[in-house]
Image (cartoon, helix red, strand yellow):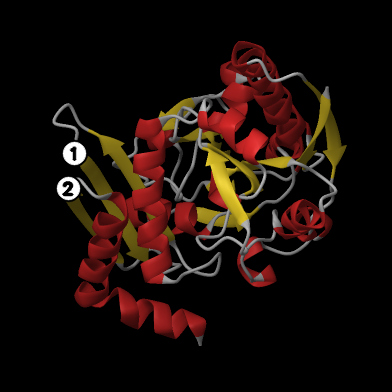
Amino acid sequence: MRNIIVGSRQSALALTQTGQVIADLQRLAKELGIAATFEVKKIVTKGDQILDVTLSKVGGKGLFVKEIEQALLDGAIDLAVHSMKDVPSVLPEGLTLGAIPKREDARDCVITREGVSFEQLPQGAIVGTSSLRRSSQLQHLRPDLKIVSIRGNIDTRIQKLHSEGMDAIVLAAAGLHRMSWAERITSYVSEEACIPAVGQGSLGIECRESDEEIMRLLAAYDDALTRRAVEAERAFLLQINGGCQVPIGAYATIGEDNLIHITGIVGSPDGDILLKATMQGSEPKQLGKQLAERLQADGAEQILSQLRG
């Protein structure tokens, strides 16, 4: 009997996600004849420690995964459950995403203080978000909005909506769904109006490439359609080479024709410039790279170079 140690951030959402993954893996392990028990190991990441600074100013990639990946490399844990949008486009040598399970809702959503939709927010409404991607796109849609930075877990952000005089906050819908808090959502923002973050709504289960037993278990948990879509988005991000300091988004779906349909955006933080393009193709990494190259040719590189300073 193997005791599989699962690394997780210690927020309520991270632990809920990890618990759901473990329940799925226990069922699969039984089906595959793998005798295993599971144990959660909570790990504090740099991103969890720095809560008084906006993500774009903290900088660096892997803010929410680096310490967890080190625990994997050290053998302190056997697998890790990440929100896919936190995972850098290049993994440390020896680690792999053994499974990308079926995606949750990828959309952003709005919680408003008065219960009105995003479109009904008054002129000059104060909207809280931790994301430059959201800020850029929302200001492009509604230049009158006043965007303020808001950090913390979902509960903390909802409390701040009321305690700090905001009219609305914008969050990833998937987190609220996983916490069974969908009733708190006032309205959803369509993927067309606000392109999601790369990997938003999906989870990444990371492990050591050399761990054959875990790799076999995770292979049974992988969702092929979600993986194709997310791989295209991640290839886009890799080619664009932008981190938290840049408003970037990409969202891919698999059509009935089995082709990948992907839309990407690069914007200026104030929302004045928003470059957007859509492509389709069959090979995810090639498609994501081509979409990025198209936006770079359209002027994304000038925006990125200015922001990188």
Using a 10 Å C-alpha cutoff, classify the residue at mark 1 as few (fewer than 14 neighbours), some (14 to 19) or many (20 or more): some
Using a 10 Å C-alpha cutoff, classify the residue at mark 2 as few (fewer than 14 neighbours), some (14 to 19) or many (20 or more): some
Q: In this view, does 15 lie above or below 285?
A: above
Regarding residue 70, the answer to whether it shows in the image is yes
x then y, percent, for residue 27: 65, 13
Residue under the image location 76 percent in, 41 percent down: 78
Residue under the image location 54 percent in, 70 percent down: 245
Left or right: 18, with 44 as reference point: left
Say which amino acid is labelled 2: Gln
Residue ranking furthest to the left: 257
Q: Is mark 2 on a helix, strand or loop?
A: strand
Q: What's the distance in space between the residues labelled 1 and 2, CA to CA?
A: 6 Å
* Observer-nearest of 272 and 4: 4
x then y, percent, for residue 97: 55, 46
- Mark 1 highlights which residue? 259
x then y, percent, for residue 23: 69, 17
The quarter of the picture where residue 57 lies is bottom right
Regarding residue 127, the answer to whether it shows in the image is no
The quarter of the picture where residue 257 lies is top left
Say which amino acid is labelled 1: Leu
x then y, percent, for residue 127: 55, 47
Label number found at residue 280: 2
Residue ranking furthest to the bottom: 309
Q: Which of marks 1 and 2 is nearer the N terminus?
A: 1
The quarter of the picture where residue 235 lies is bottom left
Q: Is mark 1 on a helix, strand or loop?
A: loop
Quarter containing the N terminus = top right
Left or right: 70, with 169 as reference point: right
